[in-house]
Image (cartoon, rainbow, N blue to C red):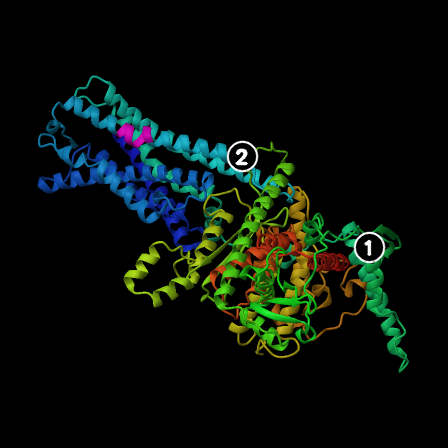
Amino acid sequence: MTLNETEVGILTVLYAIAMLVAFAGNGFLIYIVWKKPEVRSLTSFMFVNMAIADLLVTLVVMPWSITQLCADGLWMIPGIFGKITCKFIVYTGFVTITASILCLTFMSVDRYYAIVHPFRRHLWFRKPKLTVPFIWILSLASMSIFPVVQTVEDHNSECMLSVYVLGDPYRALRGIYLFLVVVNYLIPLSVISVIYTITARRLWFHVAPGVEHLAGIREQLETSKRRVVKMLIIVTCAFALCWLPAQVVHMKYVMQKWNIHITPQPIVEFVCFWFGHANSAINPWLYIFLSTKINTAFTRIFRRKSSRSPLSLCVKPSNTVLPEDQAAHEESTFKLSLESTTQKNKSRKKKGFRGVQKQTVLKAKTRDQTATVAVTFVGEEDVVRERIPPPKTPASSRKLGALEQESSDSESYEFEEVAMLSSLREALRFGISSSLFAKCNECGMEEFMATGEHAGDQETPRTIQGKDINRGVVYAPFEMGIGREGVAKLCEILNMPFSISIDTWYNHEEILHAAHDKVTKEQLKANANEAKQVAIDERTLRNDNSSLVDIPVTFDCTWSKRGFTANHCVGFVISAATGKVIDLEVISKTCNQCSQMQARLDEETFDEWFAEHQRDGSYKGSSPKSLAYIKWEDEHLQGTAHCNRIFKLDCVGHVQKRLGKALYEYQRTSVKMADGKSIKGSNGRLTKVAIEKLKTNYGKAIHSNVKTGALTAAQKDQAVKDMQTAITAGLYHSLKIEDKERHQFCPNNSWCKFKKGLACKDKPHHLDAVFEEPLLKNYDRLSEPALLQRCLPGYTNNANESINFLVWNKCPKHKWHGSKRIGMAANAAALHFSCGATKKHDVMREAGLVVGQHTTRASERRDSGRVKTGCGKSARKAQEI
């Protein structure tokens, strides 16, 4: 090859630039994944593998190309060692290039499954421990031809292909270059293009469930979709364009009439291959700047953080009062008038309280929610009259309001003193049920009677005669959370015989379990269809029973024992739209029947029995391993698994607890403050009372700025700023500093006395000025816009917490329960939570129990009380806003 000094200098500079860019980009990428655990995922491990392959290209291929340029194609190492190094370096170069290309290909496949099939995570090619070695083994195997044909020619000392060992040299060279084009370009480009096209189409046309009514989320999802699709297009184009010139040169070798002593123009060949090698320098920077997670981590590590002043959170209050703030202003006016009355009363010594009690005022305000009231704003002359909107309909009212109540005139059971029935004699007893005979003294006719259900045509007592009362006695303690011993104690106190054997008790429990299971499956199916119909109506979709519709849900797990030593776990999936349970699962680690049979039978007999036994324990492993699901969930909900179909919202109550946890941790780890005093103490120090007050203020700041409905991006940003200002105001208002600085964030015409022109005296929970700087760090962290955006709709996880309480109310955690008992409790809790107390009537009928008028009235009373309690809480909450 013949290159002049100018061409050699230009190509050397190009390779030097490519090497510097590749070193920096791939090094940064590896460092970010190693330094930031939040970006670690399956794709990030592929990033690291690709970065290592690209670094090897930079360390092996690019220096070899520069050496070839400067030495005019001559191999400078003589002898057998020169031939070995020639084979090794060329082979290593092709292996690293192939590995880098395979990484891009496997990453495209992983992104396809992460977005289109997010739940297929157990495929072998989605596990880094298998994928990474497979990529390198495949690269080593596919390029194994080059150690055979690469050598140093003796006549010209050039490291080149020697294909005479393969037969016809011309056909061999064409085959090798065609193999490189197909394996390293056509197949990967086809796979990447097809997969990214399917992925982009799926991502672009997919509509996330439950975002139609959320504030600004639809616009945010559209922006995220455009960003991801843009990244897919750029990555595909970068690979195609960078390697296209080199593959054109290879195809020229394949298609031309070969003369082994004729080579193309050297400068064109080197420039074409430089573009392909430069792809190793371009790849890492593409992912650093186009991947949101990696870009954020890169910015935090390698850029100086802009100093954040508390004043940056300040939003200048407007004199205009929004309608939703009028209730708060009304309460402020009421408090002001109440304080004035209190001050006047203090001046009157020993004359008693002459004002209106606060309880009386609250009752009067609750009595008529839609009454027209006058609200006077402090500092304004106008009086604004506004109709207070009715409180939000509670979930219990929405779920139970449409239920059809049934009634029956069936006879009921009553307690009787047997000694009073002197003419009756007990012939036989079946558990709680007794078989009685009544005999006429005149005619001698005998009539059979029973305290349980008994058909009139039966003349002799049978065991089935007492099934209803006995089964009811088994079912009632289950609903109350007690067992067989509890019923025995009840009979003992009431002086009643109790003779239900343990085997009979378990038989009744089996029948009740089967009845719960059947009714629950039917109800869950109906709840799922209802949630599906709501989603269809919201998005005006075609109602096709065969099609799948995404619906928004909440999910939570609960354990049968506190700590990580529980043997049973229950999980509920609740529809966010209807508030009803659509699925549940009970997972157990133990099977009580297996333990009993293993102790009772010999090994051979037990093995035969175990082969046909259906175990209750469906989970193997320790209880903390269930945290793996939390990690899997976080990867999908936070986007680290590159699945943008799920938008995670935070529970406001859980976010509020984070501040309390952070403050308690700071109190525990710190000893003394800058003023030399202990962090703990009495007035002015960070006590438990002060922490709880700060946590309450933080929660109120979020709740008072909740925005529901569709919001634009500007409205959403403004709402987040208002929330940040309210949070900062809660901190500064609790500090003992100058009034001007202390109340700079407090809203005008609100709860702050200083803004009303009154004296704001220090209270015991107010903190000294030395706490401003350390506490502000925690507040800044918990006032991040990304966190507060997830709190804007004001959603909570209360529904899952409520149904968890129902489960353990029937199976108390301080007692041992088997998996069937917990499964029956989960089914009963799902029925009660979704449909109310009257839904147990279906279970009773399925189990052969009579649903009488007293049962119906008691269930209706419970449901009515549940709705009434929910409406009362909603009304009080509406008054507090």
**Image vertical order of residue 345 relative to residue 243, above or below:** below
Specify whether 593 is left or right of 65: right
Please state, as top left, top right, bottom left or bottom right, where the N terminus lies in the image.
top left
Which residue position holds label 1? 369
Q: Amino acid at mark 1?
A: Gln
Q: Which residues are magenta?
A: 180-187
Is 478 positioned to the left or the right of 288 in the image? right
Taking the spot 31% from the left edge, 33% from the top edge, the residue there is 274
In the image, residue 264 sits, relative to residue 151, either above or below, namely above
Q: Quadrant of residue 441?
A: bottom right
Q: Position of residue 254 (x, y in %)?
A: 24, 22
In this rendered view, identify the residue nearer to me: 21 or 469.
469
Q: Residue at x 48, y 43 (%)?
A: 643
Observer-side mark, 2 or 1, equals: 2
Q: Residue 356's spot in the image, x, y percent?
A: 87, 69
Q: Which residue is mark 2?
A: 547
Q: Residues within 10 Å of mark 2 (few under 14, many from 20)?
A: few
Report if residue 630 is visible in the image: yes
Give SS at disc 2: loop
Q: Main secondary structure of the magenta part?
A: helix
